[in-house]
Image (cartoon, grey):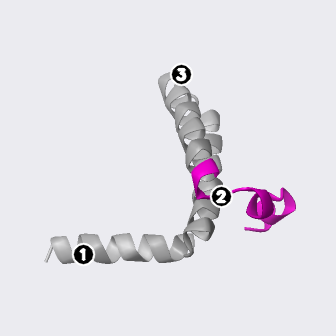
Amino acid sequence: RSWSKEKNILDKGNIKTQYIKLQEESGELAKAILIESKEETKDAVGDMVVVLTSLSYFGGFTIEEAIESSYKKEKRKNN
């Protein structure tokens, strides 16, 4: 979150720009997986987490809340 603030993403961005950025980062992850680069895969996953954190902010919740919600949903499915 502090990185997003430092880069003014939270001031200038919105949920749509962050979704587009997520798709860009997803492409970078795909490339890293295809070339079997552990370092580039790790970087791409990290970048996606940063973008998802910002996207969550613009959605009005934290990434932790999103993860918890998903976990609870999956837990209900499996019971």
- List the residue tagged with mark 2: 14
Residue under the point 63% across and 34% down: 40
Question: Considering only vertical position in the picture, is 33 above or below 20?
Answer: above
Give amino acid for label 1.
Lys
Q: Is residue 12 magenta?
A: yes
Give amino acid for label 3.
Ile
What SS does tag 1 mark? Answer: helix
Query: What residue span does the magenta drawing correspond to?
Result: 1-17
Q: Residues within 10 Å of mark 1 (few under 14, many from 20)?
A: few
Tell me if 8 is positioned left or right of 62 in this view. Answer: right
Q: Which mark is residue 35?
A: 3
Residue under the point 46% across and 71% down: 66
The N terminus lies in which quarter of the figure?
bottom right
The quadrant where residue 4 appears: bottom right
Residue under the point 63% across and 54% down: 51
Percent from the top left, x then y, of residue 5?
Answer: 81, 65
Q: Residues within 10 Å of mark 3 (few under 14, many from 20)?
A: few
Dot 3 or dot 2, earlier in sequence: 2
Question: Considering only vertical position in the picture, is 22 above or below 79?
Answer: above
Tell me if 2 is positioned left or right of 52 in this view. Answer: right
- List the residue tagged with mark 1: 75
Q: Which mark is residue 3?
A: none
